[in-house]
Image (spheres, rainbow, N blue to C red):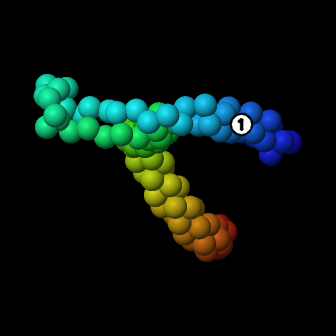
Amino acid sequence: MLRVLKLLVILPVAALLILFAVANRQPVTLILDPFGAGPEALRVTIPLFAFFFVTLAIGIVVGSVTSWFAQGRHRRAERHFRRECTRLEGENARLKGAGGSASAALSLRD
């Protein structure tokens, strides 16, 4: 079911991106030096859709890295709770093993 929903979302988006790329094939000159508009300014001539896709990819990477850093404290808390759970499971197993001999010792005292 989830796979079908993904396809229903991804296919139209992919079709729109392909249509955008086909409609915007003309070259665009990007000036990467905002202060020097002269002939020595750093210029790149690429199709408009390539500029759009590069910008989209950079946005995805920046968003992913930001999200990863923002979730750092949750990952740290999970590691802490996982270690504590392992320690408590070991202590529980140790006490269960010692509990059988302690109850036998208590019954012998009476």
Can residue 2 be seen?
no
Expressed as whole percent of the image width and height from the top left, the position of residue 104 reads 65, 72
Looking at the rendered structure, the secondary structure element under dot 1 is: helix
Q: Quadrant of the N terminus?
A: top right
Work out whether 54 lies above or below 94.
above
Horizontal arrangement in the rendering, residue 83 relative to residue 12 (left or right): left
- All told, the count of numbered labels is 1
Expressed as whole percent of the image width and height from the top left, the position of residue 17 reads 63, 35
Expressed as whole percent of the image width and height from the top left, the position of residue 67 reads 44, 38
Expressed as whole percent of the image width and height from the top left, the position of residue 97 reads 60, 72
Q: Nearer the viewer, residue 34 or 98?
A: 34
Horizontal arrangement in the rendering, residue 81 relative to residue 92 (left or right): left
Q: Quadrant of residue 74?
A: top left
Can residue 18 be seen?
yes
Q: Quadrant of residue 9?
A: top right
Q: Amino acid at mark 1?
A: Ala
Q: Nearer the viewer, residue 110 or 2?
A: 2
Crowding around mark 1 (Cα neighbors within 10 Å: few <14, some 14 to 19, many 20+) is few
Identified at 84% across, 42% down, the residue is: 4
Reading the image, the residue beneath label 1 is 15
Identified at 80% across, 45% down, the residue is: 3
Q: Nearer the viewer, residue 12 or 23?
A: 23
Identified at 45% across, 53% down, the residue is: 79
Q: Quadrant of the C terminus?
A: bottom right
Work out whether 36 lies above or below 1.
above
Horizontal arrangement in the rendering, residue 32 relative to residue 72 (left or right): left
